[in-house]
Amino acid sequence: MGQHGAPDTSNARSASSSPALDGKRAKSSKKRRQTDDAEPANGQDRGAERRLSLSKPARDLRDEPSTKRQKKHAKGDGASAEGKAKGKAKATATGSSTRTNSPVIDFDGLSRPSFGTRERLEEGPEKQAARMERMKGAVRTLLECVGEDPDREGLLATPERYAKAMLFFTQGYQQNVRDIVNGAIFQEGHNEMVIVKDIDVFSVCEHHLVPFTGKMHIAYIPRNAVIGISKLPRIAEMFARRLQIQERLTKEVANAIFEVLQPQGVAVVMESSHLCMVMRGVQKTGSSTVTSCVLGCFERREKTRNEFLSLVGVNHR
């Protein structure tokens, strides 16, 4: 009651309006909390860099597009970058060659070298003759094991023929990338796509030692410098002349071109038939295998990648 006996309605009004106000405040507070606590999609941290694709395969270390965060960080590390540049210039001035970031090319230009590669490359005539004799003996043993007579007329020279053929099939182990390119890189100010397609490729499957054959399509977008077009099939031939699998062959060709030419991007597609699944196993004579490797702008730009696939005819099959 009020002072003059009238009912006091102020507390009643305050009490009746309190639940509505409290509800609005609660909703507003909840929205603010949701906004503040929201996390990026896929559970990524705010500071994490966006991945280029759902699955990020191994690429050349330099094939990472620069972001604003990276550029800002690079400005802060100007002194360290300058020191690295001076160190690189010093190494070049002294004539020393450091190992590259390429997973395919060693510091002296050999492709995927091993102790066997080095030994075969540097051996003299005597060691070459000894290697040939060991291979001939191994082939003769194989002939005996399959039930044949290695001394009959048709097989007398087979061990030597096969040994020579296998050395030819794998001669890519002895070849040098820089010798193949042979300085055929020219500053032409060209920045449009260059494609060499339908390159015949013959290689040997490392799992069953039987051939797989097909065609390779190679494209690159120069950064002013172009390479002699005959060098692209030669690079493909070098990597094909070894024990291979198609997936690795495709990747090695792309990485080698990216390494020696430093273009904006490289794309390689290979289509082939494998005798290991035609003559044996599932024996599917009409099947073909398609592999691809895209680096640089071909990986980052869908339109550029689709243009390449359209020009080589992959999208129309």
Image (cartoon, rainbow, N blue to C red):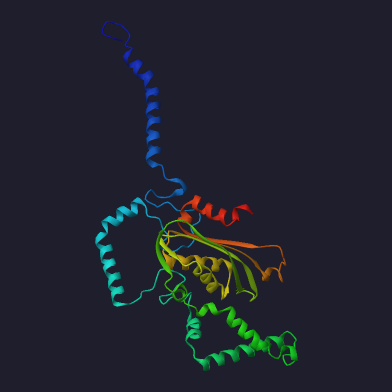
x 52%, y 71%: residue: 234
Question: Which residue ends up furthest to the left in the rendered image?
Answer: 79
Placement of the C terminus among the 4 image quadrants? bottom right
Pinpoint residue 27: horizontal percent, then vertical percent: 40, 30
- In the displayed structure image, the side of residue 207 where residue 224 appears, left or right: left
Q: Residue at left 33%, top 16%?
A: 11
Residue sitting at x 63%, y 65%: 272
Q: Is residue 139 above or below residue 99?
A: below
Relative to 90, 209 lies left or right: right
Quadrant assignment, res 106: bottom left
Q: Quadrant of the N terminus?
A: top left
Left or right of 151 on screen, residue 15: left
Question: Looking at the picture, how far across and down is residue 136, in whole percent?
Answer: 63, 89
Tell me how many marks there are: 0
Residue at the (43%, 50%) spot, across then down: 44
The x and y percentages for residue 307 are 53, 52
Asked whether 161 or 139 is in front, the reply is 161
Direction from residue 265 to residue 84 in the image, left or right: left
Q: Is residue 10 above or below residue 205?
A: above
Considering every residue shown, the one lying at the far front of the view is 188
The location of residue 13, given as percent across then percent down, is 35, 15
